[in-house]
Every structure is written in C-alpha cells, then in structure tokens.
Image (cartoon, helix red, strand yellow):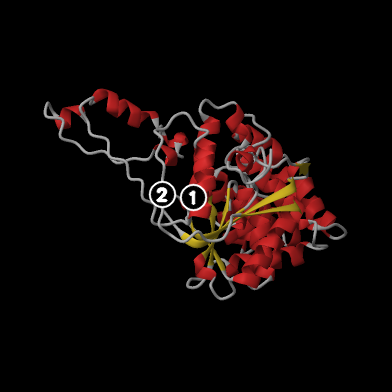
Amino acid sequence: MKRIVGANGNVTVVGDFDQSIFGFRGADPRFLQAFGEQYPRHALIKLQQNYRSTPNILAPALSLIRHNTERIDRPLTTRNPAGDPVGVWPCEGTDDEAHLVVSHLTDRFADQWGDCAILYRCNAQALALESALFEAEVPFSIVGGKPFFELSEVAMLLAYLRLARNPLDDVALKTVLNIPPRYLGPEFANALQMAADHEHTHLYQVLDCLRPPRPFQRQKAMEFKQLIERLRYLSLTRGPAQILREIRGPGGFDAWLTAESDGEPDNERGRNVDELTRVSERWTTIGEFLQHVMAVSKASKGKGNRVSMLTMHRSKGLEWPRVFITGLCQGVCPHEKATWAPGGLEEERRLFYVGMTRAMKTLNIYVPGRMWRKSMDSSQFLHEAGLLDA
C-alpha cells in the first residue's frame, strides 16, 4: 500500500476494531493501529451514530466490548426509541433451548419469519434448532452455509446408515468406500463400478469378487463388506444411535476424524457427530430417522418469508429486527479454544458484540445448563455486558 500511495499519503481506510472477527483468515485489529503509526499525520474520524439498534441493545453491547484492550474507544449513540430490554433465558439443555426459541418465535412473531434470525457459535448447535423449527412448521433457511445434515462428516455417517438399511445403495457405498481410508481410492472405485456395470448389478455385490488393481485391496474390500454386513445385522434389532456408535468406534470413524483434526479429539467436527448421535436416540429404527433427516433437509431449502439461521461469523454485515442468540455458555461463546489462542478471548468478545448488534428491535439470548452431555456455566460475556449478576 505504501508503494501505491507514494509520498503524498492520500489514502482513506475504513475499519472497525470491534468487528474484527476473522483472525483465522489473517484479520487483526492491530493492523488499524499500525496504519496510524505509519501515517502519523492522518485524520481520525469516528462514526459514532448508530442507526440500527435501540439503546437497550446498544448499552450492554458497549459494556461488553469495553473489556477489550485492542481497540479505540468509540461511545456509540442512537436516536432510536429505547425498545425492549435484552431478554436472557436460562434453560435446561439444548433441546429445551430450541423449543423455547421456537415458542418465542411462534408466540410473538408468527408470520414475521423474515424479520427473525437465530445465531449460534458452532454448527453443532444447529441440529436441535432445525429439528424444533421443522416440528413446529416454522419455515427456516440456512444462511451462507450448509444445513447440519449436509456437513461432510455428518453426511458420511448418514451414508453409513443408508448402507446399513440397504447395502445396495450405490451412492451411499461410494460415499464411504474409502472413509476411513482403506486404500480403496479412485482407481479401485472405477474398477468396482466397471465390474458392477459388466454384471448389471450393484457395487456391494461385486465387492468381494473383484480382482482389484492391487492384490492387498481385495482383503480391504472384503473387510469393508463385512462391516456393512455387521451394520445390516445390527440394524435389525438396534436403533440408529447404536449403529452410529458402532461406525464411530469399531468402524474407526472417530479415530480417523481425530487424525484429520491434527489429533484434537474435541473439535467442532467431533461435536457435530456427537450431536447427530445424541439426537438420533429419539428414533427406534434407521428408516424413521432417515425419513426425518430427508424431511428437515427439504424444509431448509425454500425461499421467501423464513427465519434465518446462521453462525455469528456469517452474520457480520447483516441485520434483522428480531435476533435470537443461542448457546451463551462458557466454552461455547467464548469458545474453549479462546483460552489458549493469543488474542482469542478478545476476538470471541468481538464476535458476541457483532452478534448482539445485528438486532434492530429485540434481542433474546439463551443459556442452556447442559450442552453436548456436559453441565455448562453461563458465559462470562453475559456478566461483562451487565445482563447477568456476577
């Protein structure tokens, strides 16, 4: 930039210390500070008029963000009416949280779905919310991301369930043929498809009779077929949650997922499969569960007057009259990784600030006492914002 600007220093930079939330992409609020140091004759113009939120939303958001040190203080004001106080709603667990959110939506804002947004920190939080919205026939859409059931690790486990129910499902078999890695890559998959086409049959039926390009692949293919047969047998008497545990444990899925995540067992993808397993306990057969999955996935695809669902990261730059922020627990928001990542806690604080300031008229925040089978404490951010007593 120095080379482009030259000696005159004629350059304008627009930025907000308090909305720098993409550190994993290289963003850092200190870049704004460095600009001021490199151009000491700069003029600093603070934009302090807020046109979006009410005073009752803005006040706790400002109280929160003032706990950060990497910022220039900017006392925002607004001429909007005071509005409703921010609602903070403790609840027992994530399912109770989801039903409470839906209750507030249907009781207060029915048919105003497009005015409403549900924000969350982690994708694993979305499943209970999607299911509750679907069951209440509240239209919704996932903004800027994939529905929960289409996340890669979730889709792989669902493919295994489809195979357990029907081993002749060629699409499902190809999805997990080499997940976890079995040395049955594209070359083997092509040979398998050619053999099935030649015999006018399904991939499963030629798995153990194919002469693969490499001799050791025959044994791997037989082991894979044995896994499918075991899952098929178990599915006759056990529900989807038990089948998922078989895939994740003896089937090696969790070990592979951990290896893919740099050896961290407690990562977001791991939480996604944990949440899938937990929610699947509500169904007694794989068929019933897969029907639910298909129905929820279809429900999230529509357009028009719908509740928006998205992560707080994806909410930046957007606004809605009614905002519902879920999962305000320590270890979720702020995320547990913030405790050891340099600058992590301040970035998590900025993230919650961004989430709060998406709201134009009303803001409701939910605090489940249990998430992912663990007891949870309320987020320190709620105390810093003055929304909960210390």
Q: Quick check: 147 above or below 19?
A: below
Out of 39 and 318, give the one closest to the viewer: 39
Q: Position of residue 61 (x, y in %)?
A: 51, 45
Out of 145 and 307, give the one closest to the viewer: 307
Q: Secondary structure at mark 1?
A: helix
Is any atom of residue 110 visible in this view? yes
Sequence-earlier tag: 2 or 1:
1
Say left or right for 225 vs 324.
right
Q: Position of residue 44 (x, y in %)?
A: 27, 35
Q: Does the residue at mark 2 contact the one at mark 1 (Cβ under 8 Å)?
A: yes
Q: Residue at x 39, y 39 (%)?
A: 74
Task: Residue type at mark 1: give it.
Answer: Leu
Residue 58 is marked as 1
Q: Residue at x 60, y 34 (%)?
A: 261
Q: Quick check: 292 above or below 227?
A: below
Say left or right for 9 vs 277.
left
Q: Quick check: 296 above or below 211?
A: below
The quarter in which the N terminus is drawn is top left
The quarter in which the C terminus is drawn is top right
Q: Position of residue 333 (x, y in %)?
A: 61, 41
Out of 130 and 36, give the one closest to the viewer: 36
Q: Residue at x 61, y 29 (%)?
A: 339
